Every structure is written in C-alpha cells, then in structure tokens.
Image: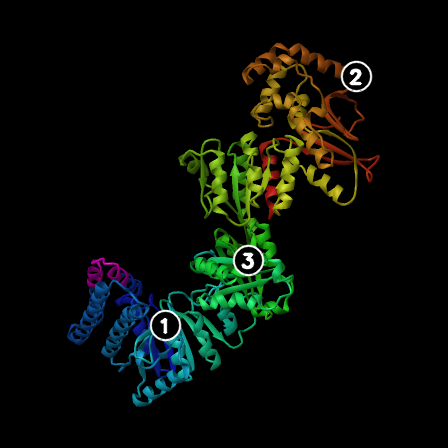
Amino acid sequence: MQVLKFGGSSVANAENIGKVAVIVSKAIQKDATILVVSALGGVTDQLIEIGIKAATGNESYKEQIQLLEHKHLETVRALLHIQNQSATLSWVKQQLNELERVCDGIFLLGELSARIKDRLVSYGELLSSYIITAKLAEMNLQPVWTDSRQLILTNEQYGNATVQLEKTYANIDSFLARHPAQLYVAPGFIASNDKKYTTTLGRGGSDYSGAIFAAATNASTLEIWTDVTGMMTADPRLVQNPKPIEAISYQEAMELSHFGAKIIYPPTIQPVMKKNIPVWVKNTFEPDAAGTVIQQHAVTNNDIVRGISSINKIALLSLEGSGMIGIPGFSKRLFEVLAMRNINVILITQSSSEYSICVAINEADASLAQQSIDAFFAYEIENGKVNPVSVETNLSIIAVVGEQMKSHPGISGKMFGGLGRNGINVRAIAQGSSEKNISAVIAAADVKKAINVLHEDFFETTYKQLNVFIAGAGNVGGKLLSQLHQQMQYLKEHMRLQIQVVGIANSKKSILDDAGIDLTNWKYLLDQAPEADIHSFVASIIEKNLRNSVFVDVTANDTVASVYGSLLSKSIAVVACNKIACSASYANYKKLKSLARTFNTQFLFETNVGAGLPVIGTLNDLLRSGDKINKIQAVLSGTLNFVFNQYDGTIPFAQVVKQAQEEGYTEPDPRLDLGGTDVMRKIMILAREAGEPMEMDQITNEAFLPASCFEGSVADFYAEMEKQEAHFKQLYDAAQAKNAKLKFVAVYDKGIAKVGLQHIPADSDFYHLYGKDNLVLFYTERYPEQPLVIKGAGAGAEVTASGVFADIIRVA
C-alpha cells in the first residue's frame, strides 16, 4: 500500500486535477493506493469567509455560495465527458444546498461556533474528493470513495482535534478489509468525534490525514504532492537562491515545519516516524523531479545545517524578579497558567541566575497571557517579589536546523556573528540539548535580512553578495560604476563575491532597485528617476534593510557626510572618498569610528589621503603591528604637485591650474587645493589615525596664494590669479635661483603639523616627484633613519575610483 496526498494548489482547477489523475494512474500500477486530497484551491478560505458573513448578518454570504457552486459545477463540466456528468453534478448540487441550509442557520443565530465552523469547512474536501473520484472512475481506475469522518476518530477539540490513533487505525483496517480495491479516495483534513460531529485536524491537516492512512496500513511510502519541488533550505519567497534538500531526517523535518516551513504540516511526521515510513515531498507540476525524502536517517552530505526557517507574529513574555531566585515552582506556575488558557509556548529561555524567564507565544495570545499571568502572580507582584509580566510584540523567531550541528563546534558563533555584523539584534536564544535547532527571537522587520544572511553563511558556496548604494554620480562616481561593471564577472569567478549596485544618487535624483541596477544604462535610469535628496535616499537604504549593505560617498558634500552616523548605527558600512567627515571636529571623527566599532561594521576612507595609494592602510598596519609614528613628511596634493611640475613661468599660472581642473585633479573649488585646505585635511587625518587628537586650527598653513584670490566666485578666483601672475613668477624664480623645485609639503612631527610651499633641493626624496604623484614618508620606531616610502598617483578620477573600489572589497 502507498498513500498519495495532493494539496490545494494541486487540485486548484480542472486542468490541475487532470495532472493529478495522470500521476495516480501511474502510481496504482506499482501498488495499491490511497489518495488523500485537499479542497479546491482557495475554497477553505472562502467557506470561512461565508461563515463569518452569515454570523455577522451580512446577506452577501448567499452570493458567495453561488460563486462556490459555480466553481465546483464548472470543474465537473471541464473534467468529465458530458455523458458522465449528471450523477456528479447532482451530488455536488445536493451538498451545496446542504451547505446553504447550514449558513442560513448561522445567519439566523448570529453565531459561528467552533463545532459549526468545522462542519462548514468540511464541505471543501468532501466536494473535491468526490469530483476527483468521478474523474478517476471515468478513466476506468475503479476508485472507492470513502468519507474520512467515518474512519478518523478524534476528541472534541474543534478546529485542531487530537486523533484517537488506535481506534482510527482499527477503523481504517476494517474498512479496507470490507472493500478490497486497488485505489481508494478520501478527503483530507476532516474527521469526527465520538458524538459523530465533524471535526478538523487544523489548517494543513490533509498532510496529517495522509500520514494517518499511511501509518494505519503500514504503507511502503507516503507522498506529499504540492507545487514546489521538495523542501528547500529556506523560504524561496525570502531567499533568491534556496537549495533543494534531497534527504532530511524525521527530526529535522519536524523542527523545520514547527518553525514555519510550510511544505509539510508539523503533526504529519509523528505517525510515519513511529512506523518508519519514508515521506516524499513531490511537485505535481514537475512529477519527474526527485523531490525530498524524509526518513529515519538522512544521507549525510556537506551541509552541517539542513535548513533555515522562521515564525512570524511572535510575542515575548518576560517574568522576572529577585523573589524567583532559588524558589522552586515559579516556572511550573507560569506554564500552568498558560496551559489553562490554551496558550501554546513556542520557545523558552531562562537566565542561569533564575532572575527571569522568557517565553515566546503567538502574538494573538499576548493580551490574554499578560492578564492571566499578572492575575496569577498578583500576590508576588503586590509584595515586590516579581515584576508585572513585560510583553514585547512585532517579533519573529528564526531557527537554524540540522542534526550534524551537534558534532561541529562554532555553528552558534557563525550564526550570531553573521546576525551581529548586519545589525540584527537578538532578543532571546534557545538551543535544545540535542543541538538540532538553534533559535533566536528578533524584530519582525529583520526576518528577511536575517534569513538571507544565514543562508549566505551556511549554504551559499558560490558567492557572497554585497549590496552597494552610491552617492555621487559625477567624475569619480562614473569611473567607479564603470570599474564595478567591468570587474563583476571577475569578482564572482575569482573571489566568490557578487557586488550588486542597488542604489545611485546625485544631488537631485536617486534610483533604487533591490535586484541590481543595470550598469550599462545607469545614466539614463538616473536621469529618468524622480527627484530625491540625500536624506530620502538614506531613509530608503535603512528601510530596505538589505544584508551586507555598503554606502559609498564619492561626493565632496557636507550634507552627505552628515548622514554617516545614521547609517553606521544601523550596521551599514560606509566607504568615504569625501574628506569632510574625517576632517571635521575631532569629536565627530571619533564618534564615527566608535559607531563603526559599536555596531560591528566598517568605516573606511582610504581615498581621503593619496587617492588610490595605500597610505591610511599602511599607517594602520604599522600601528596594529606595534610600531609608533614619529614623523610624517608628505606631498599630499596631486593637484599642487601637477601645477608646480607644469608651471615654468612661460604659461600663466592660472592657465596651468585650469588645466589641472579640466583633467579632474582638483576639488570642485580649486581654492581648497591651492589654498592648502585640502592638504591640511589630509595631514590632520593621518595625525588622527596615528593617535593625535588634532583639530584644523592647530595646523600651521604657510599659504602662497594672495588673500585676494579667496574673494568672490571660482571665476573671480581665476581672474585674480591672472592679475597676480607676477607673484607666482617670483615664487618660481626664487626656487630656480637655489636650483630647487617648488613643492607643497605637509609635515607632522611629534604632535605638531604644518603645511606650506618649500624649496626642495636635488638631494630630497621630493625632488624627483613628477606629474600628479604623491609621496609619503613614514618615520617610525622601526624606520627611524630610512623612512617607509609610499609613492604614486595621488589624484585623478580613475585612481580615486580604484581606491574606493578597493575599500568596497575590504568591506566584503
């Protein structure tokens, strides 16, 4: 004997029932078969809605019954040849007339009791099973239809009845003996009690019906046919790349189904596990696909974790107080009062000090639970032994399940480390002694993010995904997007890293796409996007709550720099080309660094100094390895180095600066470069990274620009430089007279910093510094005489973008 159960999606309409009939016709060639079916798709919900409307005096229930009748009659007409329809149409019509009389009674009484509700919803399975039997009879498969209410006996707990298994097994055995056949058809979900009243086995109970028939007949197999190809490592509605599970143990399947995996109804496992009957989860619409087998011992593979699941709409109850410590019976009393109110406890955790007990329950039961517990412990609360129970709502439980976890240390650490890196706060934790399940209570808003983080950590062997949001789509931003697009395939193949740009913003507009923005067409998409400022862009980033999120600032805007704190506090990494944040007040700089540490994320700004050169990274490596910075000497402005390398007095100084701006070496306002402000920022950032709490006003700036150059607009600046050409020629001639070159040098020495134009002799490290190159000399305890030297291009959109790109990779 074998048992096949088909769910609502499998019998949703005539076309699908035709597929079921083909599967059944093949199955009975192998072995005698019991076919258990659910109601037509959506019918159970319709019946509940009809009952509610009738009970509340809404006469539109009659119209809905007519729609239900039409649906079933049309299904019969579509399934059966016209000469075979009459008897089935008559039976369906008779059942629907009976249904209408029940609803009329509900309407008159204005009441929908649990007992009547069970009778009402039973019509769905009765109708579908009878119609399917008619189709199988037409195919000459000679099915025997039976009403499950005559066989499955339960208690009187309507809506979720407990089956009296021994009596039920005897009933089924007796029925089969009296009616020998190769094919039986039975409605799932429905049963009856000793009083012959209809009961139901809970939503999803058709699976349980199938398991009962399988256990009663010692079936060779139970097949659960649905609309997915077996069980998956996570809910495919939440995770993009869930993996199919080929085999899973009974215990693992129970854990996953209990914690929200809806492929199989939780009670289903118990009857078949006792009889060691394998359960196959198969896809009606891909019948040749392998599916998942649930059995005593799953075939061991490399997956230590078998699956990840979740339950939503959870409330957390906390009972705590010093009067609980060392006093036996508090836990018993708490669970006793919950049991008295029929409130199911999903998760339990207790502190080792016995000061508090936390339990997770369904959110719908939270108010009743709170009132009941406070009333039950009224004496202890009044005398200060315990506090009134506290209730937290809008929570969910995520569960990591796998039998192999018990023999592999570090699974909990990996789980909570991944959650922590993504800013997901854990409110409570539970792990059974069998170590098959690690559960955590988290905010409901974090469920999708959490499941994706854990699925990536435990199952994603191909790549890790980084979700990148970029503010700034100008010269550097454009180059960065081009580099990202160019390297995406390389990163996937060689680093198992998928960088997905999901947001781009400029000063006026922004685009967002969770699936990734088309980087071949981003300019057009951004141009067509609605207007949005940086604050709405950041709000969207936080609201999306995507895993492994990185915010990249390639602007020079102070408003953009002001949002870093709100992002870091949500565990969103920040990569900044913009120097404003790190060169603002020392207190702000320290706050951002502290937020990154506190919220377990990264704040990276390598391109603040030296564009793509590894200046800050090298400085930090020296400090982390125990070295000490004594002095830093540097040419830190690629712009100024380019300008003074190009200027020889034959071409106006203003024209050389204009060339530098046109080639993308300057800040948007070149006065930041030529006035020394940009270099001051850079040497201050290096001093701060070296441990010096330095502010801008502590840096001496020996400026070479006349004060008049700082007045007015950028256009006025260029006009004034032309007037001051003699001043610039004099600076050049003075250096030439000493056989020296002009370089704008920054120095940090024992807590003191200064910047200024210097005459560089031929024997200096700075003398042979050409083009837009930067040069940094680190004098340390380990490099006291011969400094550690970093040299290379220190300006330009391409190299700056590559430095930002490198920081993005570091985040991953």
Task: Tell whether position 58 is magenta.
Answer: yes
Which residue is at a point 59% across and 52% down the rendered structure image? 420
Scheme by which the image is coloured: rainbow
Mark 3, secondary structure of its residue = helix
State whether residue 716 appears in this view.
yes
Instruction: Give the distance between the C-alpha atoms of the residues marked 3 and 2, in whole angstroms.
Output: 88 Å
Identify residue type, mark 3: Ile
Q: In this view, does 100 lie above or below 798?
A: below
Q: Residues within 10 Å of mark 3 (few under 14, many from 20)?
A: some
Q: What stretch is highlighted in magenta?
A: 50-67
Mark 1, secondary structure of its residue = helix
Q: Give x and y (percent) for residue 712.
A: 56, 15
Q: In which quarter of the image is residue 16?
A: bottom left
Q: In this view, does 32 lie above or below 20?
A: below
The answer to whether the residues at label 3 and label 2 have Cβ atoms under 8 Å apart is: no
Q: Quadrant of residue 57?
A: bottom left
Q: Quadrant of the N terminus?
A: bottom left
| Along the line of sight, the residue nearer the viewer: 668 or 111 | 111
Q: Name the residue under label 3.
A: 381
Helix, strand or loop: magenta stretch: helix
| Along the line of sight, the residue nearer the viewer: 679 or 414 | 414
Q: Please tell me which of labels 1 and 2 falls first in the chain.
A: 1
Which residue is at a point 55% across and 58% down the rendered structure image? 381
The answer to whether the residues at label 1 and label 2 have Cβ atoms under 8 Å apart is: no
State whether residue 612 appears in this view.
no
Q: Give x and y (percent) for residue 777.
A: 76, 33
Q: In this view, does 693 lie above or below 230?
A: above
Identify residue type, mark 1: Ser
As drawn, the label of residue 738 is 2
From the viewer's perspective, is 277 left or right of 657? left
Q: Give x and y (percent) for residue 533.
A: 47, 33
